[in-house]
Image: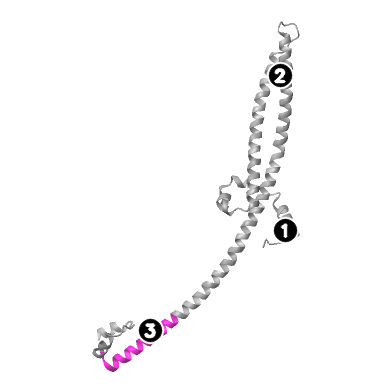
Amino acid sequence: MFQKNKKQDEEYMGRYWEAVKKKYVPLLTLDPRWHQLFPDHMKTKRMIQLEKKLNKLIKKQGQTNNDLKDYEKTRKVLMDNIINNMTDGSETDSPIRSMKQDKNQKLLDELHQKIAQAHDLQQQLPQEIQDVNHALMIESLKNCYETLVYNTQEIEQEEEWIANARKELTEHVLAKQEMEIRNTDTYRFMHDLLGADILEIFDKDYDVWKGEINREHKQV
């Protein structure tokens, strides 16, 4: 089903992407069902690449959120330092305060840049994560359908084998029944013709299927 040329593959991928891009999909690498369905030996090279990329982005998102919390704590400390070191120049330690103010302000400016970059990442990462997750979902679906196609072919072959086996079994059952009837009629004829005492002599040398005839004869 998926053995297409490059142009066909791009057309199919385009249709798949349009179909799923607006669909919410839980993060596959955090879903136990996905890992159960796709153990490592069942993943394609592309799936492994996307899985690693998605996990990296998820980790980056978590780190960015933690960084922002740390940045906020640091910003508060720097703001307190700035307030505590404010001076009008009349204090005896005003030169030291001024130096601290300059240092704190520089650190605060650098921190604001980091906060701005972290906020940009915080806004950017969800879309990147969603795009990679959707790509992984499409690749997983392709893998699923390849499995479904293969299993469907195998199921059809098994159904054909079972149908043939049933037919053959029916033929064997009918053949068995026919031979049982033939044995019954033959043994009954010999018994009626010669009697049980004569047949017992032959029975000692021949192991034959007599079915219910044995029980009938014992009752005679």
Sooner in the amino-acid sequence: mark 1 or mark 2: 1
> Please, which colouring scheme is shown?
one colour
Residue 72 image point, x, y percent: 67, 26
Q: CA distance from mark 1 to mark 3?
A: 63 Å
**182 inside magenta stretch:** yes
Which residue in the structure is indicated by mark 3?
A: 180
Residue 30 lies left or right of residue 169; in this view the side is: right
Q: Residue at x 72, y 16 (%)?
A: 101
Nearer the observer, 180 or 22 = 180
Residue 119 image point, x, y percent: 71, 33
Q: Residue at x 73, y 56 (%)?
A: 15
Q: How many discs mark residues in the rendered view? A: 3
Numbered badge on residue 9: 1
Sooner in the amino-acid sequence: mark 2 or mark 3: 2
Residue sitting farthest toward the left: 197
Residue 145 is at least partly visible in this image: yes
Amino acid type for the residue under numbered disc 3: Glu
Whether residues under marks 1 and 3 lie with C-beta atoms below 8 angstroms apart, the answer is no
Q: Looking at the image, is 17 positioned above or below residue 82?
A: below
**In the image, which residues are magenta?**
173-195
Amino acid type for the residue under numbered disc 1: Asp
Element type where label 1 sits in the image: helix
Q: Quadrant of residue 174?
A: bottom left
Classed neighbour count for the residue bearing mark 2: other residues with Cα under 10 Å, few (<14), some (14–19), many (≥20): many
Q: Residue at x 65, y 25 (%)?
A: 73
Front position among marks 2 and 3: 2
Which residue in the structure is indicated by mark 2?
A: 104
Amino acid type for the residue under numbered disc 2: Asn
Q: Looking at the image, is 169 positioned above or below residue 71?
A: below
